[in-house]
Image (spheres, rainbow, N blue to C red):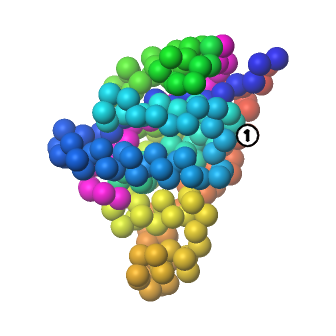
Amino acid sequence: MKAFRAVITADMVNSTQFSREESTAWLEELLVILHQNQVFKWALKPEIYRGDSFQAVLKNPDEVMRMAILARACMRKHAPNADMRVAIGIGHTEQLTDRPGTSDGEAFRLSGHLADTIRQQKARIGIALPRPSEPLSATLDLLETVIESWTSAQSQVIEALLQGKNVTQIAEKLSISQPAASQRVASAKWWAIDSFLATFPKQLSLYTKR
């Protein structure tokens, strides 16, 4: 039986409000972070296409929500209106080449269709599965209420936490006190994000079990 994979189609939000140099630099920085993160096992590594977008394929769909939130935190740290829109398709990948843009399969079609329609949704992280998944989509709506409130400073700490940094390391990296770092972690509602990520694989399994 073929395994499910997660296809990610992501594009920058409000990219026209920034210079091409800024948006390109931010997107390239994000891809370096995703490439180097040992948590993510890529079937196809993130690759820029259309200038302000990227596509990728994760071998393990359980990791995809951590990747999506990390991508948004990495982008939101740069400016108040900088962000990513992330369309996730989970299914089979019947034709997997060396590039996302020339590959095909159920997960690619689900991600591509969602990428075309996600602008009509309130949440900027969307997920499409082979079977109906309205409860999971509703959970993503609640997740959005947390993410959309992050300031640039809060996005910085979320980015660091998702890369395995602790409060001491975050304080050193950002040249702030540990109490200040802890305050940012609390105000960004990290406890809710952490709980969601811990339970996401179980939620996902409800829709991917054959």
Locate residue 27, reporting x and y percent.
36, 45
| Residue indicated by mark 1 | 202
Quadrant position of the N terminus in the picture? top right
Locate residue 147, reporting x and y percent.
42, 51
As drawn, which residue projects farthest toward the front?
98
Q: Is residue 157 visible?
A: yes
Q: Secondary structure at mark 1?
A: helix
In screen coordinates, is 186 left or right of 209?
Answer: left
In-front residue for pair 45/190: 45
In screen coordinates, is 120 left or right of 61?
Answer: left
Q: Residue at x 73, y 40 (%)?
A: 202
Q: How many marks?
A: 1
Quadrant position of the C terminus in the picture? top right
Q: Residue at x 46, y 66 (%)?
A: 157
- The amino acid sitting under disc 1 is Lys
Instruction: Identify the image quadrant of residue 113.
Output: top left
In screen coordinates, is 206 left or right of 112?
Answer: right
Q: Is residue 57 magenta?
A: no
In-front residue for pair 133/100: 100
Instruction: Tell me the magenta residue range.
Output: 77-94
Q: Is residue 61 visible?
A: no
Q: Residue at x 24, y 50 (%)?
A: 22
